[in-house]
Image (cartoon, helix red, strand yellow):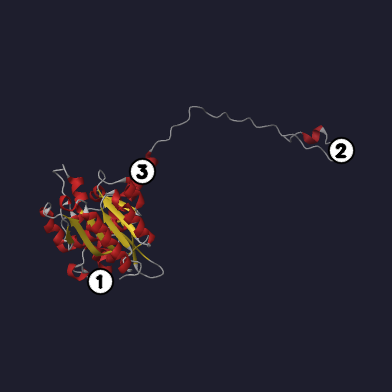
Amino acid sequence: MAEGEHTLAVFIDFENLALGFRGKRDKRFEIRKVLERLVEKGKIIVKKAYADWADYSEYKKPLHEAAIELIEIPKRAMTGKNSADIRLCVDALDLCYSKEHIDSFVIVSGDSDFSPLVSKLKENGKRVIGLGMKESSSNLLVDNCDEFIYYEDLERPLGIPPKIEQDLPEKKKEAFQLLVDSVVALVRENKEVLWSSMVKETMKRKKPSFNESYHGYRTFSDLLEDAEKEGIIQLRTDARSGTYVIIGFGKEQRKDAAEALKESKERKERKIPKPHWRPRPRKPKPKVPASPPDGAEAPSASETEPIV
């Protein structure tokens, strides 16, 4: 595990999420979007979802494909209580005490009943991230978490990343798109310096099978250099370590530079209006002869007259 990398345990109260999607025929819960956002936070070690899966059978296949353990919970009418909440809390606290290497817990729910669980996890030095729908998330839970992510925000891109040219080879386009997504993810996480090693680590978390050699590059640095050549990113070399640092998207910077150049040209071409007033020429003042020093005789009129 990389130094400073967070380890996550994800617990999904699926019934609460289903309530948020009820009545929205054009929207379905997509676990892929949730996991793609969470891998930006760190390495996901545990993934569990709780529900009476007989009512949500259409979601079982995508959840299984995402390697999520489905915990079967009996109907509330049989138990008299929402046992999904209780089971989720028990499993989370058990993991909190038994697995010290897990430092972050993700509660995918908007139910305020999980607020005491969040407080207990924070008491034990764990970071707690909440995720839920805006309409069905309690403010009590939102304010108690260290960070809360709304599901609706997962569909909103951060900024406008550069568009990958269509005439590029398919493998190269795939690598560049993964690179752009990873840079956007790191910017979203407020990373100040985007080291090449950090970017590659994020790319492998997003796609564990990623290997630069498959896309036709000998090293990851070759991939970054080619991406800069194609105008995807902008690089600089760190003076101390000699490694690459990504400083921004290439096309965005070129656009800004072009706009600045255009604006400067417009300022030069802009005509300066002439003033309506004209300054009056000043009359020269007559020269006054200097007074003689004390004891000296003043010059005579003939001495002061000009010689013709």
Residue 212 image position (x, y, % from top left): 22, 69
Determine whether the residue tagged by mark 2 lies in a helix, strand or loop.
loop
Q: Position of residue 200 (x, y in %)?
A: 27, 66
Instruction: Name the residue: 38% across, 60% down.
Output: 123
The one of 53 and 146 positioned closer to us in this rendering: 53
Q: Nearer the viewer, residue 261 or 18?
A: 18
**Residue highlighted by disc 1:** 219
Mark 1 Cα within 10 Å, few/some/many (few <14, many 20+)?
few
x and y percent of residue 199 in the render? 29, 64
Amino acid at circle 2: Glu
The image quadrant where one finds the C terminus is top right
293 left or right, relative to 89: right
Q: Which residue is mark 2?
A: 297
- Kindly identify the residue that appears in the image at 20 percent across and 71 percent down: 213
Q: Which mark is residue 228?
A: none
Q: Quadrant of residue 83?
A: bottom left
Secondary structure found at label 3: helix
| In front: label 2 or label 1 | 1
- According to the image, label 3 marks what residue? 263
Q: Mark 1: which amino acid?
A: Thr
